[in-house]
Image (cartoon, helix red, strand yellow):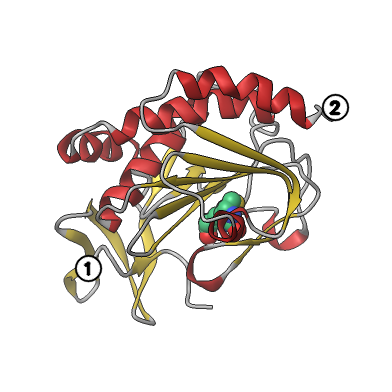
C-alpha cells in the first residue's frame, strides 16, 4: 500500500514533538541518497530526512546500499558532532531495540560490530555514520518489506516481513525515532552495556579485516573502547575496534 507523503508527515509530527533532540522531518518521494540530501539542504542537528525511494544509497566502506524498489526504509538523522564510537554504538543500540519490538518473540536482533543489525547472521539493517566539523549524519537503511533478494544477497539479508513482523515503514519510523532520541541521552557506559547484550560476534569464529589484513579466529571480546580480541591458531590477537570490519575490503 502506498501511503501519501502528507500522511507520513502528519503521523511523524507528533512523534517528533515527543523527542528531545529531534525537531524537523523532511520526507521525499525519491532521492539519490538521504545522506547527500541532508548535506544539500544544509540540515542541522535535529533534522530527519526520509526517502520513500532511494536510488543511489551508500553503505559503509564505499559499498552501495541498494533498495530502489522502495521496499526498505532509508532515513538520515542529523545530530551533533560526537566521538565516532559513541555514534556507532548509540545508533546500533537504538535501531536494534526499535526493530526487536516488531519481531516475534523467538527472533533475536543482534549487532555485529560496528553497527550491522543482524538476525541469525543475516543483515536486517545497516548504518552509515558520517560527520564533519558541523554535524554528524546517521544514515539508517532497514529491510522492511522485501519478500525476495537477488542471488548474491539471498543468504546474507533478511527483511522484517520475512521474519514475520507486521510492520510497515511508518510503524517502524514511529518506534525508530524515539529509540534514537532516547539513546542519545544515555551515558557511554549504559550504551556499552546495551551493546554487549546484543553483541552478535562474541563466541563466533569469523574472519575480520583490519587495514586489508584478514584475521580468522574465535571472537573473545568486542569493546569499542578496548578493541576486539580474537583467539587465532597462532594465539590471541588484539585488533583496533575503529578500523575492523567483518566485510572484506571492496
Ligand atoms: C551499511 O551497512 O553499509 C550501511 C548502509 C546504510 C544505508 C543507509 S540508507 C539511508 C542512508 N542513505 C544512504 O545513502 N545510506 C544510508
Give the answer, above or below, for where 95 lies relative to 76: above
For the N terminus, which image quadrant? top right
Q: Is 201 on the left-hand or right-hand side of 43?
A: left
Tell me: residue 103, above or below residue 150.
above
Instruction: Using the numbered discs, state the Cα–Cα distance from disc 2 to disc 1 in whole angstroms.
Output: 45 Å
In the image, the residue with mark 1 has its CB under 8 Å from the nearest atom of ligand 1: no
Residue sitting at x 52%, y 20%: 15
Judge by depth and name the residue closer to the eye, 4 or 59.
4
Residue 211 visible here:
yes
Query: Residue 89's spot in the image, x, y percent?
Result: 32, 46
Residue 103 seen anywhere in this rendered image of the structure: no
Identify the image quadrant of the C terminus.
bottom right
Query: Which residue in the structure is indicated by mark 1?
Result: 240
The secondary element bearing badge 1 is classed as loop
Q: Quadrant of residue 45?
A: top left
Q: Position of residue 106 (x, y in %)?
A: 51, 22
User: Of the numbered discs in the image, which one, if any, rests on residue 1?
Assistant: 2
Residue at 59% over, 28% down: 172
In percent of width and height, residue 120 lies at 51, 42
Amino acid at each position: 500500500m502506498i501511503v501519501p507523503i502528507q500522511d507520513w508527515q502528519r503521523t511523524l509530527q507528533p512523534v517528533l514533538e515527543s523527542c528531545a533532540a529531534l525537531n524537523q522531518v523532511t520526507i521525499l518521494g525519491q532521492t539519490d541518497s538521504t545522506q547527500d540530501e541532508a548535506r544539500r539542504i544544509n540540515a542541522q542537528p535535529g533534522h530527519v530526512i526520509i526517502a520513500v525511494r532511494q536510488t543511489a544509497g551508500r553503505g559503509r566502506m564505499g559499498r552501495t546500499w541498494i533498495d530502489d524498489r522502495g521496499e526498505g526504509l532509508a532515513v538520515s538523522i542529523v545530530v551533533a558532532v560526537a566521538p565516532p564510537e559513541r555514534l556507532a554504538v548509540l545508533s546500533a543500540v537504538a535501531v536494534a531495540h526499535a526493530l526487536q519490538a516488531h519481531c516475534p518473540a523467538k527472533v533475536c536482533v543482534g549487532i555485529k560490530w560496528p553497527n550491522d543489525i543482524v538476525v541469525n547472521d543475516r543483515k536486517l539493517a545497516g548504518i552509515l555514520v558520517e560527520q564533519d566539523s558541523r554535524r554528524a549524519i546517521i544514515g539508517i537503511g532497514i529491510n522492511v518489506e522485501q519478500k525476495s533478494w537477488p542471488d548474491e544477497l539471498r543468504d546474507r539479508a533478511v527483511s522484517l516481513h520475512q521474519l514475520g513482523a507486521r510492520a510497515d515503514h511508518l510503524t517502524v519510523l514511529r518506534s525508530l525515532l524515539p529509540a534514537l532520541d532516547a539513546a542519545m541521552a544515555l551515558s557511554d557506559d549504559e550504551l556499552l552495556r546495551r551493546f554487549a547484550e546484543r553483541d552478535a560476534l562474541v563466541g563466533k569464529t569469523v574472519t575480520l579485516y583490519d587495514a586489508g589484513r584478514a584475521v580468522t579466529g574465535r571472537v573473545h571480546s568486542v569493546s569499542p573502547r578496548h578493541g576486539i580480541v580474537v583467539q587465532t591458531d597462532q594465539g590471541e590477537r588484539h585488533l583496533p575496534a575503529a578500523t575492523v570490519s567483518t566485510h572484506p575490503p571492496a
